[in-house]
Image (cartoon, grey):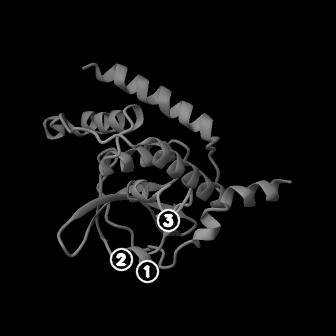
Amino acid sequence: MNIIEIKKDIDSKINDITKELNLKQSEDKLDQLSNCVKLQKYIVQNNNEVTNLNDDYSSYDKNTMRTLQLRDAVLNNSSVGLFVAVEFQEILKRIGINVECVGMSNRKGQYHMANLVLLGNEWYLFDPNREIALYNSKNGNNLNYAGLGTNSYLKDYQPEIIMPYNNENKKVPQNLAKEDIPSFFVNSIEKRKESKSK
């Protein structure tokens, strides 16, 4: 296994995804939301491989482990929750969006990985992994787990821990948004941006 070659392949694929989706760095909250929505839709449309976890990731150092998780998500289209959350974070961080991988648990002791994204002054939940199960099944091409506030997701899962990125140790942010960004707004953001630019 050549980690340097794997990193090059990941970088190349992420560059292709960024160009394909026209993801661009911006300080504007609507632009950032649009980037998140486009990426989440891309992931749920493409990451549908049920990966057999043959690698014992715990035997690697943190940087190698993250590279292998990215390999499985970005190059192999894995739908494993942790890998999808890492992919979502990595791509958005490269265009300047403040995003974290968050470990969550429910009352039954089940664990789940999702993402928190800072839009304006509040953190919103984006969950491409849970979205994969719903997208194109019951709800057409609409996203259901994008831009959520605590009033929605705390019914199911409680944020417990921020997964380290570049060996930073962070706590779950205090300024979590309470209210969702309305679903109709999330799912029409591209049309709104197009009409605004005309």
Image quadrant where residue 191 sits: bottom right
Name the residue tied to disc 1. Answer: 151
Mark 2–mark 1 distance (CA, rounded to whole Å): 6 Å
User: Sequence-wise, which precedes: disc 3 or disc 1?
Assistant: 3
Mark 3–mark 2 distance (CA, rounded to whole Å): 15 Å
Q: Quadrant of the N terminus?
A: top left
> Which amino acid type corresponds to the residue marked 1 in the rendered image?
Asn
Mark 1: give few (<14), some (14-19) or many (20+) Cα within 10 Å.
Answer: few
Tell me where residue 60 appears, x and y as whole percent: 18, 34
Q: Secondary structure at mark 2?
A: loop
Q: Nearer the viewer, residue 28 or 145?
A: 145
User: Sequence-wise, which precedes: disc 3 or disc 2?
Assistant: 3
Q: What residue is shown at x 47% (from left), y 74% (from top)?
A: 149
Tell me where residue 57 appears, x and y as whole percent: 18, 38
> Which amino acid type corresponds to the residue marked 2 in the rendered image?
Leu
Is there a contact, CB below 8 Å, between mark 2 and mark 1?
A: yes
Label total for image: 3
Q: Secondary structure at mark 1?
A: helix
Query: As displayed, is residue 111 above or below residue 95?
Result: below
Mark closer to the observer (3, 2) = 3
Image quadrant where residue 10 sits: top left
Q: Nearer the viewer, residue 168 or 47?
A: 47
Tell me where residue 121 appears, x and y as whole percent: 54, 69
Q: What residue is shown at x 32% (from left), y 34% (from top)?
A: 67
Can I make out residue 93 in this image? Answer: no
Can I make out residue 1 in this image? Answer: yes
Q: What residue is shown at x 49% (from left), y 55% (from top)?
A: 98
Name the residue tied to disc 2. Answer: 154
Name the residue tied to disc 3. Answer: 144
